[in-house]
Image: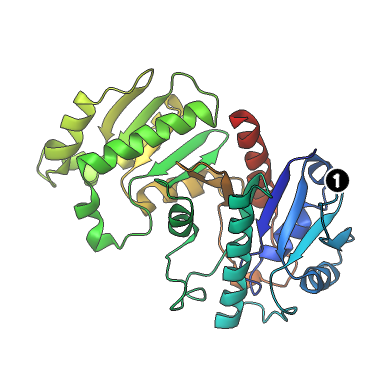
Amino acid sequence: MSMTIGISIGDPNGIGSEVVLKTFSDAKLLAACTPIIYAHVDFVVQQANHFNLQLPIERLHGQPKHGVLNVVDCWSESFQPQYGTVDAKAGACAVKSLQAASKALQQGTIDALVTAPIHKAAIQSEAFNFPGHTDFLAQEFDGQALMFLVHADLRVALVTDHVPVKDIAKHITADRIESKLKAVAHSLQQDFGIPNPHIAVLGLNPHAGDQGVIGKEEINTLSPLLQSIDIDKVEVNGPFSADAFFGSKSYKNYDAILAMYHDQGLIPFKTLSFGQGVNFTAGLSVVRTSPDHGTAFAIAGKGEADPESFAQAVQAAIEIVERRT
């Protein structure tokens, strides 16, 4: 049986459907797995026509078929996109798609989940109040979800992800950093086949605190932890000054980097690999990946979206499931 990859369609006013359809226009990738899209078959057909893409699309009845785009109707009717618009109805469609795909993942109907981009403002409601996919999946699968951005030459994990800048420091605790380090190490060994990983840890403050002159988190928390931590078959170094670490290309000497907060890790990652990187949610019993970009409302509906990152996300999901099994 071909591996089944579930796909949540993301915000229908964004580029999600475009990159999904363009990805599976590649016959090799369509042959590598059996995709199941959670949306509405009429919407998927309409989007294929809009972007002039010739694809085999079928509503799912019973067992999924290999060589076609199987579509599960999780919306009561099709959706007419208003490209580039933040809309609660579009957000509700994105949430229904994500919830249906997550349920399928829980039931074992699909082997992995690849999520197209959502708009974080559009999805908010009384029934769904999460800052993004990672937090939702952590609740659904009861795990210590880790945001792990991966590329052929660079892997970056985060101690804190969608946390306001003013609140970051209070989340930088020894227990949290140790937990994230162990999750990174385990993922490198289990999901990426690296038996003896080397992990670099970035400091929180500019210049890693300059020996306490610019903040004491490195002296009081990071350095003592890194000197005492012992993870079997894993080497951990740091804390490093983030600007010098990336500026000197020191990241090339490590299998992964643990950054303290979102922009500290994602700005260099996206600068070095944007459009080819993958967002992988490590630390869970299931496999979920996504592209490294958002809804791109500015180009939605214009046929200009590059599917490369979504295609890489599908390929990464396949490879990680294969390594785990």
Residue at 51 percent across and 28 percent down: it is: 190
Please state the total of marks drawn on the protein image: 1
Q: Position of residue 36 (x, y in %)?
A: 74, 55
Dot 1: few (<14), some (14–19), or many (≥20) neighbours within 10 Å?
Answer: few
Q: Is residue 192 left or right of residue 49?
A: left
| Residue 167 in which image quadrant | bottom left
Residue at 59 percent across and 67 percent down: it is: 296
| Above or below, 151 relative to 72 | above
| Observer-nearest of 238 and 27 | 27
Q: Is residue 72 visible?
A: yes
Q: Is residue 174 left or right of residue 321?
A: left
Residue at 21 percent across and 53 percent down: it is: 169
Q: Is residue 244 visible?
A: no
| Residue 244 in which image quadrant | top left
| Above or below, 196 relative to 21 | above
Q: How is the image coloured?
A: rainbow
Circle 1: element type:
helix
Q: Position of residue 231 (x, y in %)?
A: 32, 23
Picture quarter with the N terminus: top right
Picture quarter with the C terminus: top right
Q: Position of residue 16 (x, y in %)?
A: 66, 64
| Observer-nearest of 50 and 56 | 56
Residue at 10 percent across and 41 percent down: it is: 212
Q: Is residue 224 left or right of residue 55?
A: left
Residue that numbered label 1 is attached to: 27
| Residue 223 in which image quadrant | top left
Amino acid on which the number 1 mark rests in the picture: Ala
